[in-house]
Amino acid sequence: MENQDKSIKQKEIISKKKLLEAGVYFGHNKSIWNPKMKPYILTIKKGTHIIDIQKTKKTLEFAYQIIKKFAEREASFIFVGTRKQAKETIKFNALRTNSLYVSERWLGGTLTNNRTIFKRVRRMFELEKLVENNFKGYTKKEGILLNKEYQKLQKNLLGIKNMKNKPNVMIITDPKTDEIAIKEAKKLGIKIIGIVDTNVDPSIVDIAIPANDDSIKSITLIITILADAIAIVKGGQTLFAYQDDSKIQLPEEKKSKKLFRKKYGSKIQYRKSIFKNNNQNKKNINEEIQTIQNQKLDVHKEKLDLSSKKINLDELTIVELKEKAKQKKIKNYSKMKKDELIKVLS
């Protein structure tokens, strides 16, 4: 186990190539951004914010280590993701780590009103027994109605039917959509780890992972890595974390016109170009992001060089010295001699 941990530390949690392939860097249209996300935004590309994947990777690794520590202390987890893109991966990763999950509608009071929720869970178990007995003793019409009730309860409560105590950690795919879940978790002091897109306030979660929350690939990649932290402690297998790229298979993206409209507004041509399955196009976007990152580093170095250079006041004329004194709002500078000006400006 010790050797395994050492080999893991030598690797990166996920490669830059896979983050780009999953499209984690696509933010929302700049008109609907949250200003608190500014530290995580690299640039604006054709009206859309581009997330800095280096910061995504850094916060993802931090979240992984925190979850691993909680798992080692036998903490309980709840996975939350009620949007269409998140449902499948939320359910899959919760089941493989023996965790609670909510992939359908979040019922108000799921965490803060246990009595009501437990009553509904008990009702679900009662109906389950009736289903097993094929509604013996009930009419056909009554059986249909009871089965309908059972299906509805199972849909909403299946992931939390074994919840006995409040979970210690909530892993959530979209804090904005599931804000009721966030509020309940905060009330109970539950640690919240969430994916935050450029339109989300990152301060509403304890650990914010800046990433695209509209892409199945992006959500699957991040949630699977976080679930790997629990799985490895419980003796399970890691699927994506610290694995070679060849072992990481991302799901196919289901394109949705409604999703495009919501995310990118009226820029139809841009929407099509971003999600077009063209390898050359993807390569160009990745190269542009790399260029922007390099430019930012160059600008930073240039600023450092400029700040380190000291102006030699002796080489300036008295007119130039007086101009500098004027800018610094030094009193009676016009009557001063060159030596006096150099002294007050030093």
Image (cartoon, rainbow, N blue to C red):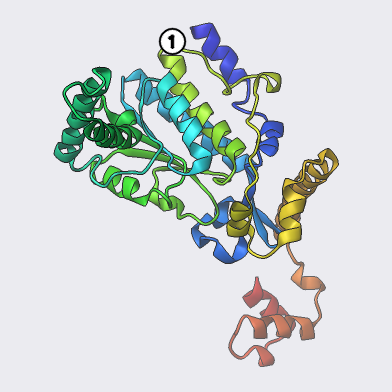
Residue type, label 1: Gly
Name the residue at 20% across, 43% down. 112
Name the residue at 54% across, 50% down. 197
The image quadrant of residue 319 is bottom right
Quarter of the picture containing the C terminus is bottom right
Position in image of residue 100 (x %, y %)? 34, 28
Residue bearing the label numbered 1: 235
Residue 266 appears left or right of 98? right
Name the residue at 26% across, 23% down. 131
Instruction: Determine if residue 292 is in view.
Output: no
Name the residue at 26% across, 20% down. 134
| Crowd tier of the residue under label 1, counting other residues whose Cα lies within 10 Å: few below 14, some 14–19, many 20 or above | few
* Between 236 and 324, the one nearer to me in the picture: 236
Instruction: Determine if residue 70 is in view.
Output: yes
Position in image of residue 43 (x %, y %)? 68, 56
Q: Is residue 174 above or below residue 217?
A: below
Q: Is residue 303 above or below residue 338?
A: above
Q: Secondary structure at mark 1?
A: loop
Q: How many marks?
A: 1
The image quadrant of residue 70 is top left
Q: Is residue 271 above or below residue 130?
A: below
* Between 117 and 289, the one nearer to me in the picture: 117
* Between 231 and 303, the one nearer to me in the picture: 231
Residue 253 appears left or right of 110? right
Position in image of residue 220 (x %, y %)? 55, 33
Position in image of residue 94 (x %, y %)? 41, 26
